[in-house]
Amino acid sequence: MTKPTLRTLKPLLLLLIICIPTIIIISNMPTAKADVNILSITPSEGYVGTTVQITANTTITNTTYTILFDTTPIVTANAVEYNITYTFQIPPATRGTHTITVRETQTGVEAVGQFVVDTQYSMEVHVPTAPNQLQENSTIGISLNITGGEANFPYFANVTVNTPAKTTFWMNLSLTALSTVGFYNATTNYPTTAWTPSTANTNYTGTYTVSWQNEAQVLATTTFFVGITNQTSYHRQDSIGIKAVDYTPNDNVTITITGITITYTTPAFNATVDTNGIVNTNWTVPSDAPRQNYNLTITPVPASKTNASDTQTFNVPGFNVTVSTRNLANNTVPNVFLETRDDATNVNYTTLSDENGTAHFLLERGNFTSHAYFKDVEVGETTLTIAQEAAFNFTLNLTTAIIHVVDTQNQDAPFIAITLSYNYTTNLDTSQNKSETQSGQTNITGILQMDSLLPNILYTLNASRYGQVFNQNNNTVQNLPKTAYAPITILLPSETLHIAITDSNNNPIEDATITAIELMGGSSDTATTDSNGTADLTLTFGKHVISVYKNNILLNETNLDTFSEQNATINCQLYGLTVTVNVVDYFGQPISNVNVVLEREGLTPFSGPTQSNGAVTFENVIGGEVHVTVYIAGQSQPVVAEDAIIDGSEAISLKIEKYVVVAGFLIETSELTTIILIVLTVLILLSVEVYRRRHRKPKKSENSEQE
């Protein structure tokens, strides 16, 4: 093999010199990489269970991410483009700083933030579900809880109970760590002999305050109430369980129940203290007890209870009662005033039905008489028997009017304006005379429904179209009945229109067709003119579009009011026109004896030859869009054709550029041009020859002289 020469290595060396720097530059260029940034953790400190929102962004659009609290995954979700927003609750954890990690799952790139968990102290007392309540001499459970506590930390609690009598009892408890991270718990009962002093009790009526404190710091507090009665609220005929302690055994006490408007005192034999010093009795809420708050007191007050006497309130609240006010057609009626009397106490309760026709009451057990007033007029009475929460329908003496407007052909009349006026006398509180007006419009079926009208009064009902009342002589309704629906029919009258049709020369047009259509809908009519150009149409009250046709061609269209019988003349300017067609040649000279055809769609064409002046005249033409063609004698194809709009008697000029009139004869323009060119050519040649000969003669004479 031959050794490579320097000349053969030069291309390779040149390639290396170019590539090596390029590779070095590319390898040192910055490359795009995935990245995650936490923008905010809100809030950044709180208790276990705190709702936290984390916002972050990534460099990879719509990527999948995972959020971790310490090492525990919270969620795996997708970013929205480059944005990450997620809300979660802090899981169980110990007190201190914890990490929140946002990890991009495709590349593993992550960002780390922090959340500080604080220790939370809480306390709960286990009381009966309302309206039940604790009574004197009851025992209550107390629970102490810690979340976000230190790991493996010995927690102790000093719990105190302050009674309504201003006495204090306390107990020290040790809290036990639960399996859930950072959770501690302790439970106890109050009162027991484990409390200090050992005389802890619930002998007093009132609020007890429970506090959890370490040294001078109060970590949590709560309260519970001890009463005399076993509930805080009752209904009529309910039995009230009454219990009180620390009285003189075998003594008699008086129990007094006082309301805003009434007082009850129990007989002495129903309130005897037992051998343990306990008052334990029952009292039935009377069937006529008003709905109100009551105060229960036991006397005489024992010496031990001078700081917290046995006095407690309870209430008789009534049941939630819903009344739906409805008219005779069973449709709800708003703004009905209801006055409901408690038959046992003669107390009146009042309310107004809302926009949905619903009224709300709080009524106790028993019978109630309810009166309904609409527009301050009594429209119904009913009896309500209440035993529990209930809903009633109250049917009112209110009628729904179905107003139907029809024309003389018994067709529905839509868009008729209806005005209903009436006078009535109120009977709520004071008697007053009032006037009101209601209005509406018939629908496409000619019907207007007017709901909840007072019966047995006089109504004035005016019907109008285009602002014109048409039922003046039949507009009263006497004593609207107490029925669900009261049908009322109103007749839309018809009027006679005497119409005359004339042409452009004011001459009558015979056999013209006239159609009339009401603008808002309803009956229509059609008629044909007689020899005098007149016709009669019977039209419904209103405004009509009057159209005039001749040979199915629209001659005129106009609007006419038909609120009364009337005469009208419609002039058709497009009918009976005189049209002259002038035909001229290329130079504007009249062309005679060519046939002109005037055509209008749907009509027999007009045709005729032009006279010596190049014109032909057609009579009784119907205007509009026409087509005019011109034919040369002996030819089947027109030499010119044009469209024109005729809106009156006029002349139409047609220019035939293809022909020229010469000595009374038609010669094609091209032929004439050829003849003229030939003549001109001959004349030019002759002129040149004459010129040439004239200029040759002088030259000959000069030569002869020289000789």
Image (spheres, helix red, strand yellow):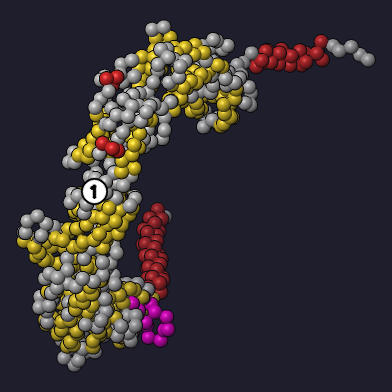
Q: Residue furthest right?
A: 1
Q: Quadrant of the N terminus?
A: top right
Question: Alpha-carbon neighbours of circle 1 within 10 Å: few (<14), some, or many (≥20)?
Answer: some
Residue 307 lies in the magenta stretch: no
Residue 332 left/right relative to 276: left
Camera sees residue 66: yes
Could you say where residue 692 lies in the image, as x and y percent from the top left?
Answer: 39, 61
- Please state the extent of the stretch shown in magenta in the rendering: 627-640
Could you say where residue 690 lies in the image, as x and y percent from the top left?
Answer: 37, 65
- The answer to whether 455 is drawn above or below residue 528 in the figure is above
Q: Nearer the viewer, residue 404 or 311?
A: 311
- Give the residue type that dot 1 points to: Asp
The residue located at (13%, 74%) in the rendering is 478
Camera sees residue 504: no
- The answer to whether 234 is drawn above or below residue 144 in the figure is below
The residue located at (17%, 59%) in the rendering is 374
Q: Nearer the viewer, residue 208 or 408?
A: 208
At numbered mark 1, what does the secondary structure look like: helix, strand or loop?
Answer: loop
* Disc 1 target residue: 288
Q: Looking at the rendering, which quadrant does residue 554 occupy?
A: bottom left
Residue 12 left/right relative to 452: right
Could you say where residue 221 lies in the image, as x and y percent from the top left?
Answer: 39, 19
User: How many marks do you count on the picture?
Assistant: 1
